[in-house]
Amino acid sequence: HKFGGSSLANVECFERVANIIASMQSENVGIVVSAMGGMTDALLNLAILAEQDDDAFIDGLHAIGERYACTARDLIDGDTLVELLDAWGRDADDIRDVLKAIALVKSAPQRSRDVVAGYGEIWSARMLAAYLGQQSPQRGGTWVDARKVVTVHQTELGPTVLWDASQAKFDDEVPADFAGVAVITGFIATDADGLQTTLGRNGSDYSAAIFAALSKAADLSIWTDVDGVMSADPRRVPEARVIDQLTYNEAMELAYFGAKVIHPQTLGPVVENAIPVVIRNSHNPAHPGSRIETGAESIDGIKGITAIGDMALVNLEGAGMIGVPGTADRLFGALKEAGVSVTLISQASSEHSICIAVPDDLAERA
Ligand code: ADP
Ligand code: ASP
Ligand code: MG
């Protein structure tokens, strides 16, 4: 089960999530968590502030600590609370050191940003584990640091999982006879050099699928703040409705083309292991949600519409292209050399133009 930031935004959210987990029947439950809603943005903003100014980040870090401590105090008490806040304090010292280094050189390298951004998941996992442990000492309380398990290779097109290494580490970290609830950090991972990295924005969905595959889960539930995958982005199209059933292909198509509800890479590991995925609403657990699994391709036409913003169209055209073999080969070869990933391709039948869509920020390079 994965709970996103929208399911872990405040005290009420944590209580709701704990109730959902308490109602789960299985003996072994893995809970992958995101940072509290807005936390990753707030952390990344600290790095931006540090680049601009020597100590503008101090207030920001303080505000983050206040938010965390207020939530923790309402949920947890006694020694557990003290330990949780102490751990936060130690992390804050480390973050301050990283930010000071950024402020000195006025530039935040990717590695530093990854380290700072990843704390959100560590904090929410620790807090949920502590809360569950307090609610039900025999079942909850364990948290797993995904950096000790998920090993990835970063490529231009995003991270790819090193499965053998990750499986070996998972088997070490989670004993075969484990029983109870394990709370696992989403989003963060380790790269082949042993350094901390992330799975990219919105990447906790992908973490959940990776852990589902590593643990040979019977199914994967992704709990969010809408009733399921919808026929369009509900923020733009109020009359969008929930799609009850999707094939992996349909869901993948929607995810790759902008449906924020699932991170595009999520479905890879679950398709491979034929693990069904259910997208559900933690704010409305009575709703059955959307089920994604292998099945007959849809025969009822279009299931959903998505949109990606900030794209650019690049048009290559000229009479010199007509009937000349290899033009497309040269075009895509050049784009590959430049590390530009193409989202959409169209070629006119006369062969005198090829039009491609690329992310806006790569348009100049393309
Ligand atoms: P979480 O914090 O749970 O990961 P996200 O904000 O990443 O949640 O994703 C859920 C959001 O995705 C929804 O609140 C919704 O506004 C948006 N969304 C965009 N397109 C779709 C879609 N086709 N179906 C459902 N939700 C969508
Ligand atoms: N917390 C991370 C983000 O905001 C990962 C996630 O929520 O999936 O991008
Ligand atoms: Mg998300």
Image: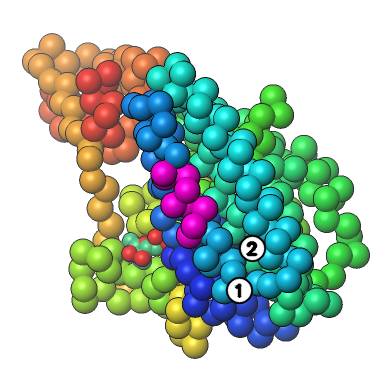
Q: Badge 1 is on which residue? A: 75
Q: Is residue 349 above or below residue 7?
A: above
Mark 2 element type: helix
Q: Is residue 227 above or below residue 363?
A: below
Whether disc 2's CB lies below 8 Å from ligand 2 is answered: no
Q: Name the residue at the bottom extreme.
A: 286
Is 301 one of the magenta-colored residues?
A: no
Examine the rendering and report whether any part of residue 54 can be seen. Answer: yes
Quarter that holds the N terminus: bottom right
Is 64 one of the magenta-colored residues?
A: yes
| Residue at figure coordinates x 80%, y 76% from the top left | 137
Callout 2–callout 1 Cβ contact below 8 Å = yes
The magenta segment is 59-67
Q: Is residue 118 above or below residue 112?
A: below
Q: In front here: 329 or 183? A: 183
Left or right: 149 as drawn, with respect to 296: right
Q: In front here: 70 or 317? A: 70
Label 2 and label 1: CA atoms lie apart by: 9 Å
Q: Name the residue at the top extreme.
A: 320
Q: Disc 2 marks which amino acid?
A: Met
Q: Position of residue 263 (x, y in %)?
A: 46, 52
Examine the rendering and report whether any part of residue 275 can be seen. Answer: no
Q: Which label number is shown at residue 127? A: 2
